[in-house]
Image (tube, rainbow, N blue to C red):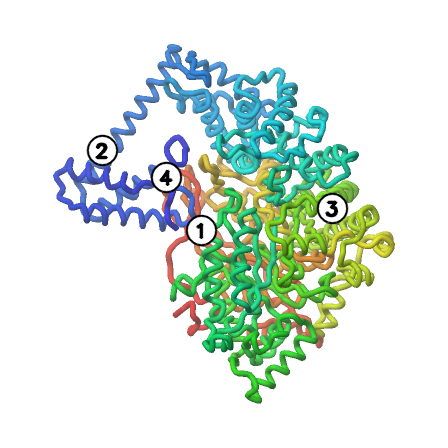
Amino acid sequence: MAITTIKKRNGEIVDFAPLKISAAVAKAFLATGTPFTQDSLTAFTESVVEKAEIFFASGAAPQVENIQDIVEKTLMERGYFDAAKAYILYRKEHEKQRIEKQQEIIEKIEKKELFVVKSSGKKEKFNEEKLRKTLAHAARGYEGIVDIEALVGLCKEAVYDEITTKDIRKALVMTVRSWIEQDPAYSAVAERLLLRDLYKRVIGDNVDFDDLERSYREAFVNNVKDGVKAGVLDERLLEFDLKKMSQKLTLERDEIFTYMGLQTLYDRYFARDATTGRIFETPQGFWMRVAMGIALAENKKSREEHAEGFYNLISALLFVPSTPTLFNAGTTHPQLSSCYLTTVEDDLAHIFKCIGDNAQLSKWSGGLGNDWTNLRGTGALIKKTGVESQGIIPFLKIANDTTVAINRSGKRRGATCAYLETWHYDIEDFLELRKNTGDERRRAHDMNTANWVPDLFMKRVQEDGDWTLLSPDETPDLHHIYGKEFEKRYTEYEKMVAEGKLQLYKVVKARDLWKKMISMLFETGHPWITFKDPCNIRSPQDHVGVVHSSNLCTEITLNTSAQETAVCNLGSVNLARHVKDKKFDWAMMGTTVGMAMRMLDNVIDVNFYPTPEAKAANLRHRPVGLGVLGFQDALYMMDIRFDSEECVALSDEMMEQVSYHAILASAELARERGTYESYKGSKWERGIFPIDTVRLLEEERGIKTDVDRRSRMDWTAVRTAVQKNGMRNSNCMAIAPTATISTISGTVPSIEPIYKNIYVKSNQTGEFVVVNAHLVADLKERNLWDYEMLGKIKYNDGSIATIKEIPDHLKEKYKETFEVDPVWVIKAAAYRGKWIDQSQSVNIFFKGTSGRDISNLYVYAWAMGLKTTYYLRTLAISQVEKSTVNAAEFGTTHKRSFAPVPGEREIAGVSIADSGTKQLEVSPVASSAVVMSENIPPPSLKLATAGGPKLCAIDDPTCEACQ
């Protein structure tokens, strides 16, 4: 991965400039009379950069010292010993100068001769006591943990003569956040210091912190007015009694964020004037702006009351709307929806219309899912021109480049996923779109891809049968039917092929195509595997259309057509905030879900729609996607292992509660506001709920789905409410990845196990190390948390599996993602999924290289009834930069393996239970070891992928990966 930034000694991240390497080496050559040319100097610099890119392949910014170490080593490797000596002396001299300069600063501070420049331009003497007072105020409540004097000392090293007060505030934050790895308390202190800086920017540089409440509330009123005047905020916000709304702000909630959560809001979410850079919001002002923006759909008489309720829900982080809603609610362009799904017709004008729609939808922060299956295959005749079609690949290349060109609202890059059904004639070329080799004109490196897999294909894989690739111009109905009807029609087309009645086709072995799908998934991470039939058979809207694809993150399953672009509006319940004293507060959950559903329904009415097709679909069907985040945090708080039946049971119960209250809330909204337009004839009207559709799936497939169908709640009241009132929303639930809003919430994303117990976090101002706060709390409780323990966890790359002092119970509880058998992730998703009317973003984390094991995991996911899967994330051999870690003490290797699943046998790579039923189960996942590097590189903790031979992806010496 190319290095674009570098970390300076003060922690600041700046652009990486290879020319500085050339200049320093040239000085060393000239000082020693070593002959060189411009070409040799350029080649030398390129060699240093190449080595650095290999070492820092994770993308983390190297420190200046890291690059200098590589320069030294490269000089000696090439025999430039005199120049290397000069370069080392040059570094030593500069280090000496830095130390002397720091000493001068310390002396000036002691003599009271160091000056600070205030925002007014006035100079005053640096006051160390002010620094200490500021840190002490930020550390209130953590006095027994935070070392104030040590922080003061470090901050003094970062100041310089005539430093600005703004830079002092930045130095304070940077100093404290570098200690977050020592204890989560430092995150709270850094967050408070960042708040102080934010208050000065938003409320005013002369803010009176002794009378903060008054100025905070006044600033909210003034900033909303100024935001409207600047054309940033919706003028309808002025219809609220702003002074009254300011009194509803709960200022204490500014301190419930982690440092990273607040920094993320500060950098990306707060409303600001793009021209001047002025920020219009404090955290509570931000939440209230979002709440008021969503409440614009309410009756004017009750608007303020609902805005207050919405504010209290989201400011307490009980429910967090999706990123587009947070970006744009209450602004002049309230595009609040997360996802758009389109179907591309086999017509040149419609193809380019859809590409144009992609641009418009991306512009306003929407993530895209495009269905391309309708387009005819390569070589099919185009009757109007009498030429052969070039298939879908050239158009996907254009769609890819459109994605790259669009910067979503100036806040994140455009993002698109292309879907293709597995019987399409161009499927083999489609699988290779993300490869790094081959004809670049037939590659799409910046666009996600996904397989839309019918059940019949999975059955053919089991049976080791043939699979026929067809062109949609000759089989126009296949993409629009599913289940038994699809199987019947597909076999009819196969007979037509045998009879010579179809012109364009190709017969392959189903397992060969499946192997290639798995191989490409392992090699490139794409295409993702999603299942057509469960998405359609279990859809509440089977009476008005077909689900042709999922979305960018594979959790949305809505009907699409040329006339309707599916839209989904997302938000997530924060499960961690609903755990009290190690028990889940189900009553609070019901209240949260009820109000969240009202907010999501409001989004549909206040939303800005970039295209008429999106508006038509959303107003007709009114789908929403209520999801969850912080599932792993809830498990930690309830002392439950992720890889356990107890976790599966909680997944089941938790989602039943969400489903129960979401459906009930939608029925209540229907009573108040009316049913959605296409309600008549839906599964809802027919009395078929998501839990009931698992049986329908089994009947269509003819295969048992091994998921317990029992419920813990009495659903009579919900079914009666729907029968009486109808539904306000065609779809209610979908679990999104929640990456950024989980950072804001201070939780692990979505429904996933924790990725690492220790990791490097990066943002615009630099990098710092974060340790799992739940783990730290448990270790503290057992008097096991100290600097030595931190070093051991660092050395083991976050894993605690081999640290002998830690009890086995905690080792089981705090397994990282790649230490959890992915079978448990899939099983929990299956039990959760029976309650969901859309789908879930389910990542598969696999440590190993066996294609057979990967195949079995996806067969298991299909057999358990999952509708979609998301990324396959694999773990290669890794090395870690270990700072302040003694290799001899902590060892050089550790092993991590998946627990085997007993009682199964494999048949040609597909694991089948020994019983007479056709129930499928996954085979054991192979154990593997991660060997840690013995060398101790320069300071900080970063991951880097080590070089090594390409491993076979599918246990086949003739496979493409090996070739």
Residue shown at the point (68%, 74%) measured from the top left: 918
Position of 894 with respect to 827 (left or right) is: left
Q: Is residue 706 above or below residue 728?
A: below
Disc number for residue 893: 1
Distance in Å between CA atoms under marks 2 and 1: 36 Å
Marked residue nearer the N-terminal end (2 or 3):
2
Tell us which disc is closer to us: 4 or 1: 4
**Quadrant where the C terminus is found in the figure:** bottom left
Question: Percent x, y for residue 79?
Answer: 18, 47
Question: Quadrant of residue 11 in the image?
Answer: top left
Q: Amino acid at mark 4?
A: Asp
- Callout 2 touching callout 3 (CB < 8 Å): no
* CA separation in Å, label 4 and label 2: 26 Å
Looking at the image, is mark 4 or mark 1 earlier in the sequence? 4
Residue type for callout 2 = Leu
Q: Which mark is residue 15?
A: 4
Q: Secondary structure at mark 2?
A: helix
Mark 2 neighbour density, 10 Å: few (under 14) some (14–19) many (20 or more):
few
Return the residue at label 3.
597
Q: Which residue is mark 2?
A: 89
Disc on the earlier residue, 4 or 2: 4
Coordinates of residue 259 in the picture (x, y in percent): 55, 33
| First along the sequence among labels 3 and 1 | 3
Question: Disc 4 and disc 1: Cα gap in Å?
Answer: 35 Å
